[in-house]
Amino acid sequence: MNLAEGLTPQALEAPPSGIVEVMNYGRGRPGMIPLWAGEGDRPTPDFIMDAAIASMRAGETFYTWQRGIPDLREALARYHARLYGVPVPMERFFVTGSGMQSVQIAIRMIAGTGDEVLVPTPAWPNFAAAIGIAGAVTVPVAMTLEPSGWQLDIDRLAAAVTPRTRAIVINSPANPTGWTATRDELAAILAIARRHGLWIVADEIYGRFVYDGSPRAASFRDVADPDERILYIQTFSKNWAMTGWRIGWLEAPPALGDVIENLIQYSTSGVAAFMQRGAIAALDQGDAFIDEQIEAARRSGQVVSEGLAATGRVRFAPMGGAFYLFFRVDGETDTRRLALRLVDEANVGLAPGTAFGPGGEAYLRLCYGRREADIAEATRRLQAVLGSSPLRRTA
């Protein structure tokens, strides 16, 4: 009996993750430096864990609010007011079981069978997967690598709109390229969306990870009205070292509250209250920790950028936002095989560019959001293997 014959096309066609393939290949190897996933190596700080533990000990282990406990939604409002300089009502925030669930909910609200969603590429592969699972179609809009960094051609984006287009996904600062949209670029993208009645899914989770001295990257909040067709994706994972907690939030116009609440109810039925107490501590007490994270990433990014540039074989954009080096190696075209070989030959785990869609195939992604000593050692290993000539081939 072929059990797969009874499954939906959306489930069967969900693409395997090229990142996970390399992770599974290299997991558990002694001395492995894993730079394949988008996370740092610092555990969640004590002040966050203490708040969660205190909540559990106080008996907050029951079902809770589908939209998130009011205390957390109020903390989110305070955080955004502090970061963006304008008051934001708590009714705009909906607590989710990770940033990925926020993506899933956002896509399911605005796109379905036969609809098209524009995604600048190279891009985090989960966008296309979420779109496909919803029955919609991803339309990639190719970005280009210029001497100043990756660039999105606004005219090309506008030309990709068709009568079937429902939304544009914008991830800035971007995973994996580091592209960080300017305020003017965001305004131009918003103008396209307004002209065609499109939604924008704004993934701004790396908005604090910029290295030009600014407190944050430009945001659609800087150019949009409060009730625009914009859904903001956010997570506690990156800023506060909470990747394993699986807690995020979706920001949306309050008029959508009942719809979002229902989608949360019928998927996870809410996020554990004790996790939300930890999230409140992160928002209210975590600014100094974020500053430390950003400074550590800046130093580590400089170490690996300078070290790989010294090989004479590596090409990449200047450090922008987020915490990834997205680079290509002269003479190497099959980055899936290259990533697997680097596990064997350098004991360093990187993500193959083939995982990031059109335009990413020739690249590798390295997460430098880790302690400087590990990044320095990984850089030395990669230098030794890459050298100045193509990698030796394995059978």
Image (tube, rainbow, N blue to C red):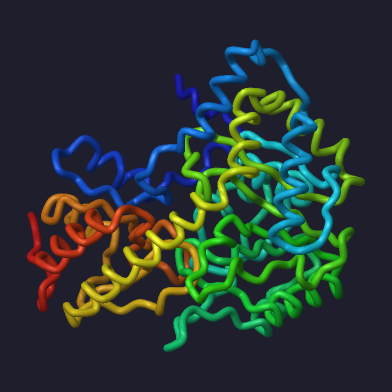
**Hey, which quadrant is residue 365 in on the image?**
bottom left
**Front residue (pair 299, 220):** 299
Count every numbered label the image shows and give the total.
0
Percent from the top left, x then y, of residue 277?
64, 29
**Front residue (pair 169, 209):** 209
Q: Residue at x 59, y 62 (%)?
A: 207
The reply to whether residue 9 is in sight is: no
**Front residue (pair 156, 257):** 257
Q: Is residue 129 above or below residue 151?
A: above
- Determine whether, in the image, residue 155 is placed left or right of residue 304: right
Q: Is residue 287 above or below residue 166?
A: above
Q: Quadrant of the C terminus?
A: bottom left
Percent from the top left, x then y, of residue 285?
59, 43
Q: Quadrant of the N terminus?
A: top left
- Determine whether, in the image, residue 66 is placed left or right of residue 33: right
**Hey, which quadrant is residue 43 in on the image?**
top left
**Front residue (pair 304, 316):** 304
Residue most toward the right? 255
Q: Is residue 279 above or below residue 119?
A: above
Percent from the top left, x then y, of residue 299?
34, 66
Percent from the top left, x then y, of residue 85?
76, 63
The reply to whether residue 66 is in sight is: yes
Q: Residue at x 42, y 46 (%)?
A: 17
Q: Residue at x 37, y 62 (%)?
A: 353
Q: Residue at x 67, y 82 (%)?
A: 154
**Hey, which quadrant is residue 325 in on the image?**
bottom left
